[in-house]
Image (cartoon, helix red, strand yellow):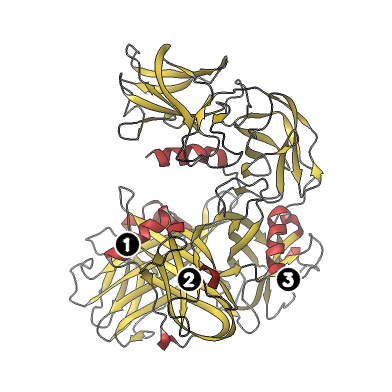
Amino acid sequence: MKQLLCVSVLGLLSTAMGLGQSLETVVFHAVMTTANEVPPTTAEAGGIGTLTFHLTRGSDGAIANGVVDFDVNFNHTAATRFTGLHIHGGPAGVNAGVLIGTNLSAANAVVHEGGAGRVFRQVVVTDGALLGRILNQPDQFYVNIHSAEFGGGVIRGQLARAETLLLRARLSPANEVPPIAGLDASGSATVLLTAVRDGNGEIIGGSALFDVNYRFGTSIEATGLHIHNGPAGVNAGVVIGTDVSARSGISGTSGNITRQVIIATPVQLTNFRGLFVNPSGFYTNLHTTVNAGGAIRGQLQYTGALPMRVLLSPDQEVPPVTGLAASGAAALRTYVTRNAAGRITSGTVVFDVNHQFPGAVEFTGLHIHRAAAGSNGGIVIESGVSPNNSVNSAGGLGNITRLVNIDPDSPAALAALNDLVANPERFYMNLHTRVNPAGVVRGQMGAAEAGGPAINAGGIISAVGDAQIAPASPGTIISIYGRNMAGSTAEASGLEEAALPISLNGTEVRIGSRQAPLFYVSPTQINAQVPYETEPGNVQVFVVRSGDVFSPPTPLAVTPFSPGIFVTSLGAAVLKNANNSLVSTSNPATAGEVLSIFGTGLGRVTPQVRSGDFAPAGPIALTLAQPAVTVGGREAEVLASALSPGFVGLYQVAIRMPAGVAPGNQPVVLTIGGMRSNAAPMAVR
């Protein structure tokens, strides 16, 4: 619970800005069993349905239409013919009519010879209200696959909103244990986890999609692709494996391997949960006939998500395409890793385009190009759609989704990706067709800005959000408000080192002569840490874009202490130490309880932690001075004051709840070095 609270508090430091969404993608999972049918069927079968909704929203925010991807991985022991795949509108235990169907039918059946298999279908849905109902109450709908033997359905499952997590690993023979000397090889692995949780938040199932690029100096034959449960430098057993084997026929000097694994066994589920909590404790390994124990491997790590949305239209082409009523609502989702300087070192780019054309169309290209509005430019990031790998749409309305890995082996694409997130107005997305090979609909990835970065008057405050308290002291987390301060929005995530970067998407903050570690950047808000080395006094603050475009200087008064208490939707950010539960109106503080108050601005610590570094679990970094705390005006016994381990600039103060405080919401106040915090409300019994 403490971890969840700290994440919630730091979530305040990465406020998502409004992006004017036109395309939304939502994933649902369904555990499909014979027992879920009404009545249950006698087939030996089961499966997982993954349904991806690509939703187009109008200018009013309402869902206009959407495209639904049905992706059912199943195991059906006996041979059969699948004759239907639908979404039905009914709760568990009730049969109901079809609301969204596919083209799977008795006349267009899938013949299955027995064993494991997969059925994929894409369906256009024009009923926006229906899609909205499914989003709001997914458990009132179920997906059902039908067979010749069981016309009413052979396996079915209720829909459940799923969450996704994309992990990456850089694969190298040097990471094997022992390292493989002299092997010319490299690779990258993307593992997309899709999980379903129960009402208590526990992961109960899901899937893992492997997408691996490999390169060897000489031809190889792949014999295995797995996730192992072990840290760097340690060999460990397979916990989530794919079906890649010597019989798979995967060979050559380079290529791509894509596999989806359904989480089915207790061992898989336990380790699947572990991947969400500590991915660096797991590694991906590609095995070959020559190196049976593993040829290239890498530890998995979190990635940072960089979403961009764009509207594609014919009039933005150069020259404009006239007489065509076509459009595209597109999202470019990029998942990246970053080095200590904040530069992107690898990325997975997901193209997601809902296209709307008046009739049948063949798409022959989908790319990111480098050029400003009104100009044509070369391709810098390809999706894989091409004249030889085209996409046909019979009705003109549909979705194209493609996943592309960008690695150090592709330095030009990696450089373009770094430039794209810093200066999106210099790039555009383009969709090409057989009829319009130069491009049929396009859109700039960002709008051109008027002027350079600027900080608002009074725009630097404590990250707790109270402009009335002292904003800055060494180590404090601050929020900076202004305009044109970043080309796109980014959080400090996907970090290769346990420290905040000094640059995000080409944006830096200078406090005096020092670069500030960054939590979050957007065009209008930045969250940063005041370096511990900053001496008290008046300093100038600058926002810097692309290394050489400076904002006008903004004065900032730095004091030795600037205490502030974070406030959540439930009140002051305070935990009960006995059970790590959050204090709230339903869980009020009681006299004598030991509580931890979370805030910022308590100054330097001992042993001193480097600016931007995550606070260590040991030795604990104690504040040089101890604050005084009052609750409802009554003084509390202060037991400890230190940085919160595993976080940057976040302090926690342990107190014993004083007696005699009136029940209800009472103010909690920290005072240190003569500086007083905001009065944060806390529920008291």
Q: Nearer the viewer, mark 1 or mark 3?
A: 1
**Amino acid under label 3?**
Ile
Judged left or right of residue 19, residue 442 is right
Residue at position x 60%, y 21% from top?
Answer: 469
Q: Residues within 10 Å of mark 3 (few under 14, many from 20)?
A: some
Quarter holding the C terminus is top left
Distance from disc 1 to disc 3, alpha carbons, whole Å, reads 41 Å
Circle 3: element type = strand
Residue at position x 50%, y 58% from top?
Answer: 301
**Residue indicated by mark 2:** 178
Residue at position x 75%, y 33% from top?
Answer: 512
Image position of 547 with respect to 321: above or below:
above
Rendering coords of residue 23 (x, y %): 56, 58
- Taking the image as drawn, is residue 162 in sight? no
Quarter holding the N terminus is top left
Rendering coords of residue 135 (x, y %): 42, 54
Q: Nearer the viewer, mark 1 or mark 2?
A: 2
**Amino acid under label 1?**
Leu
**Nearer the observer, 684 or 108:** 684
Circle 1: element type = helix
Q: Earlier in the sequence, mark 1 or mark 3?
A: 1
Q: Residues within 10 Å of mark 1 (few under 14, many from 20)?
A: many
**Residue indicated by mark 1:** 269
Judged left or right of residue 42, residue 254 is right
Distance from disc 3 to disc 2, alpha carbons, whole Å, reads 41 Å
Circle 2: element type = loop
**Residue indicated by mark 3:** 379
Q: Residues within 10 Å of mark 2 (few under 14, many from 20)?
A: few
Q: Earlier in the sequence, mark 1 or mark 2?
A: 2
